[in-house]
Structures are given as structure tokens and as C-alpha cells.
Image: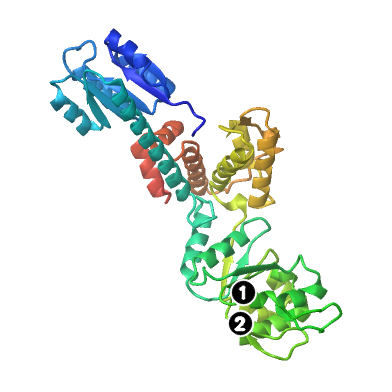
Amino acid sequence: MKNDKKHLLVVEDDKGLQSQLRWAFDDFEVTVTGDRTEAINQLRRIQPGVVLLDLGLPPDPGGVTEGLATLSEILSLAPETKVIIVTGDNDRANAVKAIAMGAYDFHQKPADPELLALLVSRAYHVYLLEIENRRLQQHDQNMPLKGIITASPQMLKVCRTIEKIAPSDITTLLLGASGTGKERCAQALHELSPRANGPMIAINCAAIPDNLLESELFGYEKGAFTGAAKQTPGKIEYADGGTLFLDEIGDLPMELQAKLLRFLQERVVERIGGRKEIPVDVRILCATHQDLRGLIAKGLFREDLYYRISEIVIEIPPLKDRESDILVLAKSFLNTWSKEYGRSAMNYSADAIAAMEAYDWPGNVRELESRVKRAVIMADNNQIRPEDLELTEADSEPVPLNLKEVRDEAERKAIIRAMNHSNQNITDAANALGVTRPTLYKLLERLGLKV
């Protein structure tokens, strides 16, 4: 926010005081108005962080009715704006009344420019802090677990499961297509566990050649094979006291599956070329995008190993099956990469949003992040178009025949889209849907949706 203009709105009908206040605030862009109507128009236009408000405004310059009405309207339209009341010497009671209505502070005339500048600066600092706090709270609402951004019921269910099993040492198998976030879920399991202060060692069973994988996992003694110049512990030993994450375990060679099974049963390892059994205290997390039961049927994966690693199975849904997550994640990635590349105030066009929601995302969250990153770099201006994402709006998927299911599903999707497009603002969402606020609340309750 440091690059944003700092706006101050002065509402004062005294021409002499207007001129004095216009030049009293070097750090602000000052807009001066003399009545309620003009003040509200400027409030909508410049969205000031701070307003200096005189209570004696026309058509009631000798009273406070118009000033208090202006205060009420400002706080209704922009509740985060800090309003400082500028009042006469003998008007302390009305100043206190304004504070009770929600004004930030008051200053008695004659105006002291230096003191007023201090009050305005402090009020603007509080305004910025509250805006940032609100932003962080909204961000946290989309992050039920650290590193997992979601608003969909499907992923929230996954997050609740992670929270339940994290305190235990139960061996967990994470299933899901490539790019769905299996490693993020494994990281969350580790960080929520009593082992969070210990190491989390990850090894990708598909990325290491078969002839090297055994030594990577179990280590080796000096002279165990050509090139073994020194004793080297394996990844399992390095994970002692923490968590071992075996990614793509479906690619583990059959000869290593038996050795891994023995470790899971006995919790001891033998290095290659060694005879000493080394006890290891470690929690095992596994992940794969493959159908392990299908591999078992083909004789490519041990059934007894499958039952050892699948004491708890968490299935992570593909992105296309996560209600509302596409837009939530897209906005988060846009915020991240626009900051990374110094492109502020970027947003998506309506047709870009429609294209993202229509696309199937075979590469899941990883593909979405990659396309958003590319779009931030390639966009000609601050608005991202479908072509920046290399997307075109596709035909919708067929809907079920049952009329009640069709209606409920259509209402659910429309409400979720409206809530996301309005940043969870009930009034704006109701206006976009063409219903009243009470009707929208009833629909949310009937469909089991939460704000």
C-alpha cells in the first residue's frame, strides 16, 4: 500500500478554513467540500482513508443536524474510514455524541494545523492497519491449513481429516492426480503433528533410478560397492524423530517393496553392506497418483505393503471437482505473481473468469498456477484476458436429468459464483442474483452453504 495515494477529505463550509486546511497536510492529497451532497460524492470517488468533518454544515450551519447526518452516511458507506470531527469551542457534547456514533476523534476550533496533521497521520496509520488486518483475515479464511488455499466443501473435508489424524503416528496414504496438492497435504500433516520440530524428509520414488533408490532410502557402509568411499546414512535415518514422505510410492520397484515392508513392520533399517540393525523413530506418509489396487492385480505392487501404508487413506479431489476453488486459487496466485513481477492492481476480465471456470484443468492446481504466472508476464495491461491464460471458453458439461438435482446444482453454482465475485459480500451477491438478502440467506441455509 506504500505506493497508493493517501487521500484526505475535508468537509468544511468556512472558505477561510477551507483554504487553511487545503495546504496543511503535505503527505496527503486533500479534497475540500462544503456540503453533505458534495462530500458523499467525493467519498465515493476518492475513497479517503481519513475525513475531517465540520458538524455545522449548510443548510444548518448553526446546528449539528446536517453534520451528524453526514457522519452517519459516511460510516454507512465506508465504515473503515476514520472521521475526525472539527467542532466549536462550546460544542464538546456534540463531539462526544459523534464519537459515540463511530467517529474516530475530534478537534476543537480554532484549528491547530500542526495538531490536526498529527491526528490525521495517526488516524490514517490505524486505517492502514485495519485494512491489512482485514486482508489477512480474509486470506486466512481461504487457508484452513497452512499452505492450503480452498473454499470448497470437498477440500475442507480433506483439511478436517488432516487435522484429526495429524496428532497420531498413523501411516497415511495420499491419493490424487498429479498437481492436486498431495505434497502440501503431507506438509500440513507434519506441521500439525507432535513431530513438527523434527525433520520432514521427502523422497520421490519415481525421480531416482532404481539402482540408486535403495542406497538413498537405506544408506550404505563404506566399501559396500564401488564408489562407496564412506559410511552414508539413508533418508530413512535422516528422518529419525520426524516424518518420512515417500512420494510416488506406486513407482517403487518390487525388490525394494519387500525391504520397505520389513522396515514398516520392525522399524529398523540395515544399510547396504552392513549387518547392524538401526532403530528409527519415524512417521510414514506416502503418496501416489496411480491406482495401487490395479497395480496389485497386475502383480506390480505388494498387497501386504499396500495394507501397511494405507492405514488411513486421504483422497484429494481434482481441481475441476472442487466447487469455487478455481477462482479462489486464481486470485491468490494472481496476487502472489503480480507482486513478484511488480505488476500491481491486476485483475481478471469476466471472460477470463468464465474460461477458467469452464476449463477441466487436467494439470490441476499446478497447471492453474503455471497459467496465471504466464498471464501476469504476458498481459498487455492490468487486466488478464483468456488469451493471456491460453484458454478459450468451452461448452458446459452435461447436467443430470432429475429436475430437483438440476435446480439445486444450478442454484448452488450460481450462489457460489456470486459470493466469490462479490468477495463474500451478502448484499452485493444478492443484488447480482436478483434476490433479497433474506432470500439469499434462506438459499444458503437450504443448500448447506456457509458465508
Dot 1 and dot 2 residues touching (CB under 8 Å): yes
Q: Pick out the residue farthest to the right.
A: 226
Answer yes or no: is residue 298 visible.
no
Q: Pick out the residue farthest to the front.
A: 114
Q: Is residue 206 left or right of residue 177?
A: right
Q: Label 1 sits on what residue type? A: Ala
Which residue corresponds to mark 2?
Answer: 280
Q: Is residue 438 left or right of residue 178?
A: left
Which residue corresponds to mark 1?
Answer: 239
- Picture quarter containing residue 138? top left
Determine the residue positioned at 69% across, 40% down.
374
Mark 1 and mark 2 lie on one chain; the one further toward the N terminus is 1
| Residue 284 locus on image (x, y percent) | 60, 74
Q: Which class describes the residues within 10 Å of circle 2: few (<14), some (14-19), or many (20+)?
A: some
Q: Of residues 257 and 187, which is closer to you in this image?
A: 187
Kind of element beneath mark 2: loop
| Residue 318 locus on image (x, y percent) | 62, 55
